[in-house]
Image (cartoon, rainbow, N blue to C red):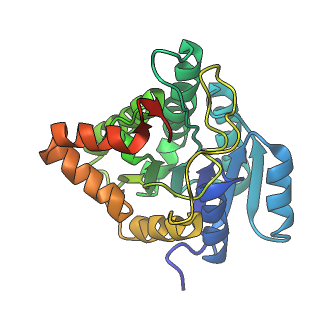
Amino acid sequence: MSAFNNKVVVITGGSDGIGKSLVDLFLQQGAKVATCGRNYDKLYKLQSDYPGKPLIIHAADVSKEQDCKQFIDEVIKQFGTIDILINNAGISMRSLVTDVELDTIRKVMDINFWGTVYCTKMALPYIIKNKGTVVGVSSIAGYRGLPGRSGYSASKYAVNGWLEALRTELLDSGTNIMWVCPGFTTSNIRNAALNKEGKAQGESPMNETDMMSSEECAQHILKAIEKRKRTLVLTFTGKRTVFMNKFFPSLTDKMVRKFFFKNGELVK
């Protein structure tokens, strides 16, 4: 029997990419799953794929505190408790600091950081009672600032630091706090990334051919939750970046600059 059988798993941003793959995977494991997203049509399609399965869908914008409260309240109303919360909802950006509108950075921070804070704070009493797990789907950008993604990097650094503080506070409670840092993964996050005006950039300039699939990423996250890990850094490039930035930061500055720029122009 699966370790997640009959566990209540809450996943934010479950209509696309890694979030959807996590919903698929945990339902297959026999869990009761609740997910939210801003696009109700995608959520409805997801629910229609699992007739008769214990799946709650809820239209919500995690940057809004009241939306998060209504979502968590709905989970408790229908399932009675929460064992695992995976803060997956997020958005990226692509613009130089000199060009970007401040509202774009604020929007990224509101979704990525405050969305994690709101949902975690509201679900935490139930998770602590069950000695469960809180997961933050962060990024390599939470270990290494990436050009053209200043607000995204800032939000993921904030998520990592906030969850590390929470983990330390709850160290003796039996509750596990974990943050996951995928490298470049095939998902909709790059297409939905905000440009300097705060609008979706559309087609991504990144080549996704050799990237980890969202399904594989979800498998790694599930195994890490089962093992109650502290952190999970995925892909060889991701692990190399974290290592290089820790021990050779000046060299990493140059390597990252070379990767993202060509002839002085941001190309990725």
Give the percent coordinates (x, y) of residue 65: 62, 26
Using the rendered image of the protein, determine whether residue 102 is visible from the camera's viewpoint: yes
Using the rendered image of the protein, determine whether residue 172 is visible from the camera's viewpoint: no
Give the percent coordinates (x, y) of residue 219: 51, 71
Which residue is found at the position 85% from the left and 58% from the top? 45
Relative placement, left or right, of 1 versus 79 is: left
Give the percent coordinates (x, y) of residue 110: 55, 26
Which residue is found at the position 38% from the left and 61% from the top? 234
Q: Is 245 placed above or below 227 here?
A: above
Relative placement, left or right, of 119 versus 244 is: right
Give the percent coordinates (x, y) of residue 235: 38, 63
Q: Nearer the viewer, residue 232 or 140?
A: 140
Which residue is found at the position 65% from the left and 54% from the top? 80
Relative placement, left or right, of 116 versus 34 is: left
Which residue is found at the position 54% from the left and 86% from the top? 1
Displayed quadrant of residue 30: bottom right
Number of marks in the rendered image: 0
Q: Nearer the viewer, residue 56 or 80?
A: 56
Q: Is 194 placed above or below 56 here?
A: above
Q: Residue furthest left?
A: 247
Q: Residue furthest bottom?
A: 1
Q: Residue furthest front?
A: 263
Q: Is 160 placed above or below 99 here?
A: below
Q: Nearer the viewer, residue 202 or 117?
A: 202
Q: Nearer the viewer, residue 156 or 177?
A: 156
